[in-house]
Image: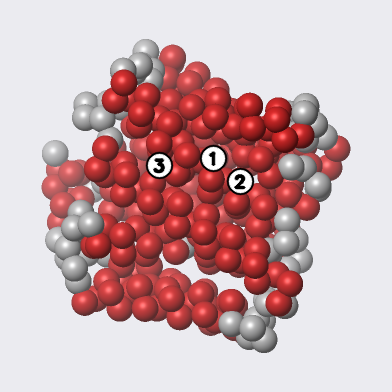
Amino acid sequence: MPRPRLIVHLLALFFMGSAWGFNYALARITARGGANPLGLAFWLSFGGGITLGILCLVRWTGPRVTSHHMTYYVSSGMLGSVLPVTLYFYAASHVPAGVLAITGALIPLLTYALSALVRVDVFSIRRLTGLVFGFVAVLFIVTPGSSLPPPMLPRVLVSLLSSLCYAFQSIYMALRRPAGTDALALTTGMMLASSAIMLPLVLATNGEGPLAFPSGKIELPFAAMTVLSALAYVVYLYLVGDAGPVFASQSGYIVTVSGVLWGTVILNEHYSAWVWIALVSMLIGLTLVTLRPGQNAADKRHHEG
């Protein structure tokens, strides 16, 4: 790969990872401001859907409306937006941003575990070892008396449940993704379907309160979170198409580390030694699970093609 092109790819990777990592701090600021988790999840999906929809129009493409596509939008929206984002904001009001980032790193590990169970992926001792490291990292966080006060532990478990939802979504996407459809259009349809599902729920549970756009001190961070999420996803699509999926997946390390660092810098969070050990253990687990033999060669062929 020519050096200027590699530099662009590295800068894009760093931006994407840092943006997603920064969103953990922004989510915590927003959730602590007292906004309703379901309302926040609605606005995030709706804002992301509109932003990506505009990009679809620029590219002269858009979500297809068939029974298969609509089923996909609704199902993936439930697993990848409605449930996990609501749970995520619920947890973010009490769980430090750095801990949220570490639990978020479980997504690829859980995805591999589920894919191996349903035989979408092959069993590997090395990747199983990565799962063990991820499990150990969680134990360092949730074991009573190790790192976090007991009142915070139920919210950490909620964040873990959010990661599990994303893992289920990944498996569903691998099995049921409509063939020949642009990824940007699929994500736009998913986000718009998610917001459509949540709208009546928000109205039924809290009237128009949660639909009022977050105001005051949480308005700016929430808007920034919505924009950064959309931009980071666009950069992700660019990297997958131009640098290959393996290269793009390396953003997971940057997301996790930057999530912890942003929590320290922006929110002045302080973590016990157990949390730092959990971070190292999770990064080892990510390395063992996400890097597979032959994938780097596949990405090289992708560049040359």
Name the foreground residue: 233 vs 157.
Answer: 157
User: Looking at the picture, does residue 132 appear above or below residue 245?
Assistant: below
In space, the residues marked 3 and 2 are separated at their CA atoms by 23 Å
Label 2 element class: helix
- Image position of 95 (left or right of 76): right
Lower sequence index among marks 3 and 2 = 2
In space, the residues marked 1 and 2 are separated at their CA atoms by 6 Å
Label 1 element class: helix
Query: Crowding at label 1, few (<14), some or many (≥20) Cα neighbours within 10 Å?
Result: many
Name the quadrant of the C terminus.
top left
- Image position of 205 (left or right of 33): left
Colour style of the rendered protein structure: secondary structure
To which quarter of the image does residue 282 belong? bottom left
**Residue indicated by mark 3:** 236
Residue 119, percent across and down? 18, 58
Is the Cβ of the residue at disc 3 closer than 8 Å to that at disc 1? no
User: Looking at the picture, does residue 118 appear above or below residue 270?
Assistant: above
Residue 270, percent across and down? 72, 74
**Residue indicated by mark 2:** 86
- Image position of 239 (left or right of 199): left
User: Looking at the picture, does residue 298 appear above or below residue 240?
Assistant: below
Query: Crowding at label 2, few (<14), some or many (≥20) Cα neighbours within 10 Å?
Result: many
Asked whether residue 11 appears in the rendered view, the answer is no
- Image position of 271 (left or right of 299): right
Lower sequence index among marks 3 and 1 = 1
Residue 238, percent across and down? 36, 37
Residue at 45% of width from left, 52% of height from top? 165
Residue found at the very far right of the displayed protein: 216
Residue at 51% of width from left, 75% of height from top? 138
User: Looking at the picture, does residue 59 appear above or below residue 220?
Assistant: above
Label 3 element class: helix
**Residue indicated by mark 1:** 82
